[in-house]
Amino acid sequence: MNTLGELVNCGKAKDAALAAPDRQSLTYEQLRAQVDYTANRLNTLGVGRNDTVAIVLPNGPEMASAFICIGAAATTAPLNPAYRGEEFDFYLEDLQPKLLVVEEGTDSPAAASAEKLGITLLVLKHEQTDPAGKFELIGESISPDLLKPGLAESSDIALVL
């Protein structure tokens, strides 16, 4: 059984892994670097394997990349950005994620729900001039105690729906 981190290693370094109109493609080499960055960033923030990270992002290359990169290091829980506040309250309370990832500048009610429930917000920042799917994660540490650092293993959970 392959993990998301292992699957990313299947592509040739210079081949396009993610593409979007009017944007430079993200190569497999760059995607592997993004996976490593994301795993290290999550670990630095106190999030590791089997910790749940909710993602509320619009469809696009950054959502695709975030799903792959976060799923390679933690358990992802993508949520529909069109949900209303009450729906985010329900799903976030049920999932109990350690982090909620939202796009920089969003006015999503997910952020208010996360604050109400004491869930740490992590902001995904990207530039239109960067390759499609390249991003930075901005946020503060939630716990100095990390039980399972590094990339996910085949027995770990990658996705919760």
Image (cartoon, grey):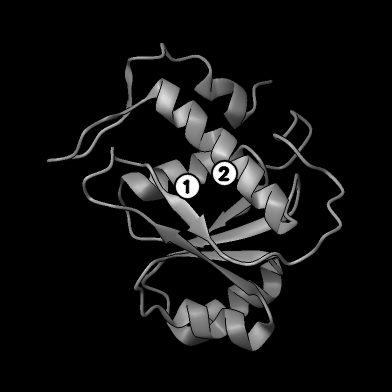
In this view, 85 is above or below 29: below
Relative horizontal placement of residue 41, taking residue 63 as reference (left or right): right
Q: Work out whether residue 159 can be spotted.
A: no
Q: Work out whether residue 83 can be spotted.
A: yes
Asked whether 84 or 152 is in front, the reply is 152
Q: Tell me the residue at 38%/67% (across/down).
A: 104
- Closer to the N terminus: mark 1 or mark 2? 2
Corner quadrant of residue 27:
top left
Q: Name the quadrant of the C terminus.
A: bottom right
Determine contact: label 1, label 2, CB under 8 Å. yes
The picture places residue 155, in percent across and down from the top left corner, at: 79, 32
In this view, 6 is above or below 122: above
Counting other residues with Cα less than 10 Å from the Cα at mark 1, is it few (<14), some (14-19), or many (20 or more)?
many
Q: Tell me the CA gap for discs 1 and 2.
A: 8 Å
Q: Tell me the residue at 41%/14% (across/down).
A: 13
Q: Amino acid under label 2?
A: Thr
The picture places residue 60, in percent across and down from the top left corner, at: 30, 49
Asked whether 145 or 103 is in front, the reply is 145
Corner quadrant of residue 6:
top right
Residue for badge 1: 66
Task: Looking at this view, name the residue that lies furthest to the left.
Answer: 22
Residue for badge 2: 38
Q: Name the quadrant of the N terminus.
A: top right
Q: Amino acid under label 1?
A: Ala
The picture places residue 110, in percent across and down from the top left corner, at: 49, 77
In this view, 102 is above or below 44: below
Relative horizontal placement of residue 69, taking residue 12 as reference (left or right): right
Counting other residues with Cα less than 10 Å from the Cα at mark 2, is it few (<14), some (14-19), or many (20 or more)?
many
Asked whether 103 or 154 is in front, the reply is 103
Relative horizontal placement of residue 65, taking residue 144 as reference (left or right): left
